[in-house]
Image (spheres, rainbow, N blue to C red):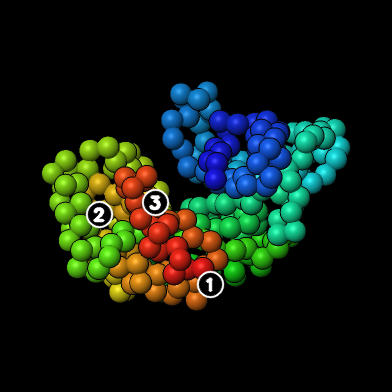
Amino acid sequence: MIAIRPGYWQPALAASALATLDDLTGGRVRVNIVSGIDDPAAYGDGAFDKAGRYERTREFMQILRRLWTDDDVRYDGKHYQLSGSTLRPRPASLPERPHPTLYFGGASDAAERVAAAEADVQLFWGEPLADVAERIARLKRVSGEVGREHAPLRFGLRITTLVRETSTEAWRDAEAKVARMAETAGVGWHDHKGEVAVGQQRLLDLQARGDVLDTNLYTAPGRFGGGGAGTTWLVGSAEEVAASLKRYRDLGITTFILSDTPYLREIERQGQALLPLLRD
């Protein structure tokens, strides 16, 4: 999965680079379109208000799709213009996807309207089950409002999963990790500075509802150093975490992006203990 920020890439250049990599890897490329700001001045990007950024993002995604599937592409948008553009090589065309899957996040109204119109998969961070169910229902409704022209929007979950052999061991390690975060007062978490995105604020607000929500959704990391997918964790034995992920699946989540830190050690642990329980 490759993160691409409109404004840091021109859409035709991004489409070409991603198509080449997808062709070389036999269709393994997935693309996460990131509309939020990072450091625009450092990349030579212009200043945009939120509405302008999402407007540009929608055009960017439209152009990627067309260049990956059509010849002689002409596009006349507010932010991008193309004339007679044909891409070679194209991405690998597979039965389950005509081009690299476009993932998109964001919880603001503007973000959800872009996702409902143009994304293949809307990614959620680790919110409680009821909150995710509410967002899925809203995005399905918005898809109709914006006149979605693609296959139905799918939904994914990006979350930290802290897995140990037993529940007791998992919670002991989770609490110890949060205690170490508290010692450094969140140093290294840049989301504490400047604007906090709507989706991130939703995660921070969960702390007021308790340190543990649903069965094992741990919100305490957000007080001290967890940003993005690290703000809330699913904690427990492999069986407990698998059961929680299956409850998200029952809501309509079809894509799961799981990790914990340090990455190398924890990915091996999850691959051995957690993934075999999710094979169905």
Which residue is painted at 65% across and 41% down in the image? Answer: 25
Q: Is residue 32 above or below residue 280?
A: above
Figure quadrant of residue 247: bottom left
Gap between marks 1 and 2, in whole Å? 30 Å
Gap between marks 3 and 2, in whole Å? 20 Å
Gap between marks 1 and 3, in whole Å? 20 Å
Query: Is 146 on the left-hand or right-hand side of 135?
Result: right
Find residue 267 and name its label.
Answer: 3
- Along the polypeptide, which appears first: circle 1 or circle 3? 3
Q: Nearer the viewer, residue 44 or 252?
A: 252
Residue at numbered disc 2: 221
Categorize mark 3 by other alpha carbons within 10 Å: few (<14), some (14-19), many (20+).
some
Residue type, label 3: Ile
Categorize mark 1 by other alpha carbons within 10 Å: few (<14), some (14-19), many (20+).
few
Find residue 97 and name its label.
Answer: none
Q: Is residue 84 above or below residue 133?
A: above
